[in-house]
Image: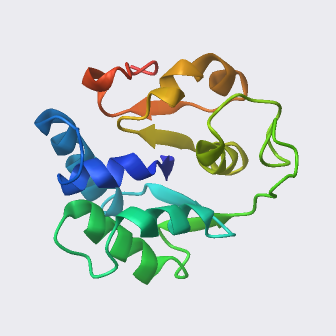
Amino acid sequence: MRAVIETNVAIAANGRETHASYACQYSCIEFLEQIVSLKSKDIILLDSYDLILDEYKKYLNFKGQPGVGDIFFKYLHDNMYLNVKIKKINITPADDDTRGFQELPFNQLDKSDRKFLAVALVGLGIVVNAMDSDWHEQIVSINAMGVKVNQLCPEHGCPNPTA
């Protein structure tokens, strides 16, 4: 799997300052631990402008503590240039507010989420989401672009359309 991980997954895995249920937190913890495992062949996709990392920085701790989301963030920071489990994808910001990135067609996805969509589209990956209902609300247009969304927390109003 090639995955673009929405910020809310790491926030939920931390288990603090979140409205995520315990089941959701556990799903996010399991997912993050599995994707960084050396046994896993999964690839984490980031953007070459570091827009995703910049968003992570607002909510996660570089020290890798105290939560699993913080550990994931530190892992990305420490390993992103090794080009083994993490791939940086080139995307091009656009002045066009209806797209957000040159690689995207017109879309109504929240502006802050478009970087994840652009990376998934160009990097041939899926978006992994925990609690952001925008992904579920826009799933038809997202799927029409050829991008799938893995919803880790269906109990938060985000049923998994890929299940």
**Figure disc tally:** 0
| The quadrant where residue 111 appears | top right
Q: Nearer the viewer, residue 52 or 36?
A: 52
Q: Residue 149, percent across and down? A: 50, 32
Q: Residue 19, percent across and down? A: 23, 38
Q: Residue at x 50, y 72 (%)?
A: 84
Q: Which residue ends up furthest to the left in the rendered image?
A: 22
* Residue 38 seen anywhere in this rendered image of the structure: no
Q: Residue 87, percent across and down? A: 58, 66
Q: Is residue 27 shown above or below 53?
A: above
Q: Residue at x 54, y 68 (%)?
A: 54
Q: Residue at x 37, y 18 (%)?
A: 159
Q: Residue 114, percent across and down? A: 66, 44
Q: Nearer the viewer, residue 97 or 106?
A: 97
Q: Is residue 123 shown above or below 20?
A: below
Q: Residue at x 56, y 30 (%)?
A: 148
Q: Is residue 90 left or right of residue 73?
A: right
Q: Is residue 41 shown above or below 27?
A: below
* Residue 45 seen anywhere in this rendered image of the structure: yes
Considering the image in quadrants, where does the C terminus appear? top left
Q: Nearer the viewer, residue 92 or 17?
A: 17
The image's colour scheme reads rainbow
Q: Is residue 73 shown above or below 115?
A: below
